[in-house]
Amino acid sequence: MRMQVEPVAEAVVMEVEDQVTATGTPPLVDKDLVAQLVGDAQRLGLSVEGEGGLLAQLTKLVLESALEGEMTAHLGYDKHERVEGSDNARNGTRSKTVLTKAGPVEIAVPRDRAGSFEPVVVAKRQRRLGAIEDVVLSLSARGLTHGDIAAHLADVYGSEVSKTTISTITDKVLDSMGEWQNRPLDPVYPVVFIDAIHV
C-alpha cells in the first residue's frame, strides 16, 4: 500500500517507480525515505530546488560523506579511532563553496596534519562540479556572450560566475576545437542523397 504524501513527494515516488520499471534495478535510496524527505521539506516550507533547498542539502551531505570516506581511506582508520604510531591524523575541516546543479553548496572539506590529503570527489581549488562547465560550453556554443552566460547562471543557479571564469572554461576547449577543425580530411567522402517522399 502506498503511503499518503504531498503532491510533489508523490511525483518523486512515481519517478522512482518508473526508474525501477525502466531499468529493472532498484535505486540506491528507498522511495519511502525520499517521499518522507520531500514531504518534510514541504511542511517546513523548504523548497526542493534552489539555494538552501532540499537538493542542495542532500548534495552537501553526499559530498561531505564522500570526502570523509576518502580521508578514512587516506589515513587507514575511521574518525575518532586511536592509532598508535601513525604520523598523520585528521586536522578539522575547512569551508568551501562549490557550484553544483543544485546551486552553490557550502561543504566542510576534511584536512590532515601532514597536508598530504588530495581529495578526488571535490579536488583542491575546484569550485565548480563538471555539470556547470558543460552548461557554460553549451551556452557559448549557442552564441551567448560571456556576460549573457554569467547572467543566465546567476538566474538559474543563484551564483555569480565572473566573465573571466567563463572565458577560462571556454578556452579549455579551444585547442581541441582547433585540432578538430584543422584535422586532415579524406580526399573523397561517399554520400547518398535521396530526395523523395517515398523510398
Image (cartoon, helix red, strand yellow):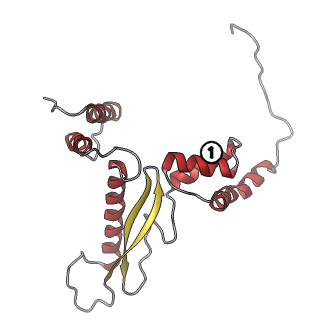
| Residue 142 vertical position relative to residue 107 in the rendered view, above or below | above
The structure residue drawn at horizontal position 27% and vertical position 31%, both measured from the top left corner, is: 7
Residue placed most toward the observer, 7 or 174: 7
| Element under disc 1 | helix
Assign the N terminus to one quadrant of the image: top left
Residue 179 position within the rendered picture, expressed as x and y whole percent measured from the top left: 76, 54
Q: Is residue 167 left or right of residue 182?
A: left
- Specify the quadrant that holds the C terminus: top right
Count of marks, rendered view: 1
Q: Quadrant of residue 138?
A: top right
* Residue at image coords 41%, 78%: 117
Q: In the displayed structure, would residue 8 be above or below residue 51?
A: above
Residue at the extreme top: 198
Where residue 21 sits in the image (x, y, percent)? Answer: 31, 30
Rendering coords of residue 150 (x, y %):
61, 52
Q: Tell me the kind of residue under disc 1.
A: Ser
For disc 1, the marked residue is 138
In the picture shown, does residue 196 fall above or below 137? above
